[in-house]
Amino acid sequence: MRLSRYFLPVTRETPADAQIVSHKLMLRAGLIRQTAAGIYAWLPFGYRVLKKIEQIVREEQDRAGAIELLMPTIQSADLWRQSGRYDAYGPEMLRFPDRKGTEMLYGPTNEEMITQIFLGSVKSYRDLPRTLYHIQWKFRDEVRPRFGVMRGREFLMKDAYSFDLDEAGLTGSYEAMFVAYLRTFARLGLQAVPVRAPTGPIGGNLSHEFHILADTGESAVFYDAALEDVSRDELLAADASTIAKLTSLYAMEEEEHAKIETCPVPSDRLHRRRGIEVGHIFAFGTKYSASMGFSVQAADGSQVHPHMGSYGIGVSRLMGAIIEASHDEAGIIWPESVAPYKVGLVNMRADDAACAAASDDIYDKLAAAGVDTLYDDRDERGGAKFATMDLIGLPWQLVVGPRGLEKGVVELKRRATGEREEVSIESALARLAG
């Protein structure tokens, strides 16, 4: 993509209402624009990142055996009355009548709807187990929306729901999702800590939150330092033994930690860091299947209420978490797995015929090799181009200038480390296409 034809409204100034790093940088780098309190438009650059995050989440859900569908954003209040949650959920739920006076709501989650859809269609134990998921926009009317996409009112979420014949089956489904989450966050370049959590309005007695460790996180987490020793490779190859290892190590939010009189972790191993919650999984048994009157026939002919779990990941929230965990004073540093473009190609002299021709040729060759490239072909000062590239945080910068071309070299910069080197055009292309 040529930057001269792209829509990337970057700004130098930090908006006055932006309080945390990710909110500031997402606005400055032209990823989002606020349209109402806690509601954002995703601009082309930000939308590319969002779709890449979504795809990694989707691939790991599919790998775990979950089946994708799509449910509507608008739900009937009657569904929530069946489960007993309509009055209990609280003012965060946006409620309204349709033109006929029927009470409706903008779904904050989908336990009731998926229960009706799936269990209303199956009758036998032969149809279990199943896990269904979708990636859908949600709305929760936060009393104080803030921190950009970290605590907005409208957000993109992956929510999955498992159905099993008994508690043992539910445990297996829960563990499969646990593994999927570990793999997902590792692929996104994030270090996630699983924390035993209260179940809240979802219900049940087994629940874990996944916190991304970042200095600007919204909550404090106390945890065993051994959690930091778990390697990315180990998380990518996670299995039941990995879950057992991680859940055996102490991790608790500060509020819950304060209730513990005797901490089980020695003081030299007890770490405190800020954390950003990006995922939450629940096993709540028969809460919804029983309250909504759904059962299936077991192998012995008896009728049983299926055991259920739900599993959420804040897809749009993850973008803010990645930036909080990966930035410097100059701007964003995208992990390559979610970067909107792999390479930022900088033509230092758009008014120089030789420089423009060489840059055009490099751009064409990168495109032919399937390398996503943002080509800064604008007639701007070199300093402004470098500042833009550092702000938007693409993994690689390839700089083409008249002096370098005279020597037959270009400059290749790795954004994460700041390392620069002069290499031949052929070497640069080979490295970036590799």
Image (cartoon, rainbow, N blue to C red):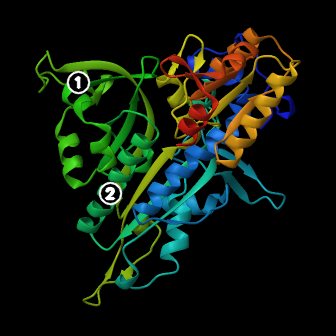
Quick check: 258 above or below 202? Answer: above
Answer whether residue 242 is visible to the viewer in this image.
Answer: yes
Q: Position of residue 53 (x, y in %)?
A: 56, 44
Tell me the residue that label 1 is attached to: 259
Amino acid marked by disc 1: Lys
What residue is disc 2 on?
174
Above or below for 176 versus 118: above
For marks 2 and 1, give the CA distance. Answer: 27 Å
| Nearest the eye: 229 or 420 | 420
Give the quadrant of residue 11: top right
Q: Which of the 4 image quarters holds residue 330? A: top right
Q: Quadrant of residue 148?
A: top right
132 vs 431: above or below? below
The image's mark for residue 205 is none
Q: Residue at x 39, y 41 (%)?
A: 186
Horizontally, is 32 left or right of 434 in the view? right
Mark 2 against mark 1, which lies toward the viewer? Answer: 2
Q: Amino acid at mark 2?
A: Tyr
Residue under the image location 45 percent in, 73 percent down: 293
The count of marks equals 2
- Seen from the viewer's position, the closer of residues 343 and 17 is 343
Residue lying furthest front: 407
Q: Is residue 42 in sight in this rendering?
A: no
**Precedes in sequence: disc 2 or disc 1:** 2
Whole-percent x and y of residue 104? Answer: 70, 55
The residue sitting at 18% across, 35% down in the picture is 249
The residue furthest bottom is: 301
Mark 2 lies on a secondary structure that is helix
Q: Pinpoint residue 177: horizontal percent, then vertical percent.
A: 37, 55
Quadrant, the N terminus: top right
Answer few, some or many: residues within 10 Å of disc 2's Cα (few below 14, many 20 plus, some between 14 and 19). Answer: many
Side of 75 where 119 appears, left or right: left
